[in-house]
Image: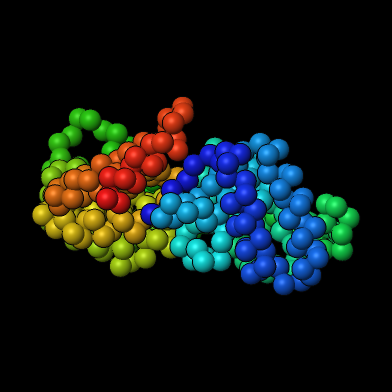
Amino acid sequence: MIRLRPASSADHDDLVRVWRRAVEATHDFLTPDDVDALQHDVARYLPRTPRLLVAELDGRSVGFVGSDGDAVEMLFVDPDAHGRGVGTALLETALADRGAARVDVNEQNPGAHAFYAARGFTLVGRSALDAEGRPFPVLHLARSAGAAPGLLSDPAWEAEVAALWDDGTIDDGRRVEAMRALADRAPHPALGAFELGGAHDSAGHEAEADVQYRTATDAGLATVDGARAAQLVVQHASTLRNLGRIDEAVAMLGSASWHPSTGDAPRVFLALALHSAGRTDEALRVAVEALEPTLPRYHRSVRAYAAALTDR
């Protein structure tokens, strides 16, 4: 599972290594001398980056993002971790509290342009030279508020769904029936199935919730609404745990990608599922590792103690 945390000065050498591996894999327009020169610039810039987040997989730094306000200054992922959601997790976390965002990418790096375009960024300008005056054209991209990718919905329908969830005057049975009616006219079947599954889940109808969650997944919820898809993983896995299908719950939560709509919730629910499976040391490790980034200090010690729970 992807783990995100603030960077410290102790991370900078690792981040430079990640930067170099990423650049060598994607920036084939640069010569080795170019890369060497840029590496020195990156090493000097990292300590001055206002906000720097690190992504870890299996305890190893595999990516980072540096941001300043609404600007993504740098985002690099080790090529060995490409395709695992690391870049998306870093980007959306860095910009979670921003209505809009902007980023510059090298024109000669089409992969970066495609990555941001798939996440709602559009071209707003171009410069023939990079910020240092070198002959590497730069594309200026921006994402407007509300332009997050993969969202297909209808504001009026969303308002009705939210009102139904907020209505404390109706019982579970009436909420399920009302949600069923809303699901029938959802702007996409995956959205309707997800909300109906949630209503069954809230009512304690675990088997029915399982059916609807699977329907939502099969209908392509991940391509329709990324936030709901992330929430579905947590909710469906919790349902599976309550149904006694604990191994399925563990597998689902263990492969969950980080998303700002759920934060560390998948890790919390994974700890619960592991405990239910009798894997108590693993459960405690996951729980401690989820808590560790919130501590004011002792990060390295806590990570080491957590790892020791299962590395003996």
Residue 157 lies left or right of residue 201; in this view the side is: right
In the image, residue 177 above or below residue 108: above
In the image, residue 252 above or below residue 307: below
How far across and how far down the image is residue 128, in percent?
Answer: 86, 61
Residue 86 lies left or right of residue 245; in this view the side is: right
| Residue at the (73%, 44%) spot, across then down | 45
| Residue at the (67%, 64%) spot, across then down | 23
How far across and how far down the image is residue 300, in percent?
Answer: 45, 38
| Residue at the (34%, 59%) spot, across then down | 255
Q: Nearer the viewer, residue 14 or 49?
A: 14
| Residue 108 in sight | yes
| Residue 156 in sight | no
Quarter placement of the N terminus: bottom left
How far across and how far down the image is residue 186, in percent?
Answer: 34, 56
Residue 86 lies left or right of residue 193; in this view the side is: right
Q: Nearer the viewer, residue 160 or 79?
A: 79
| Residue at the (16%, 55%) spot, across then down | 246
Q: Which of 310 and 78 is in front in this view?
A: 310
Q: Residue furthest front?
A: 312
| Colouring chosen for the image of the structure | rainbow
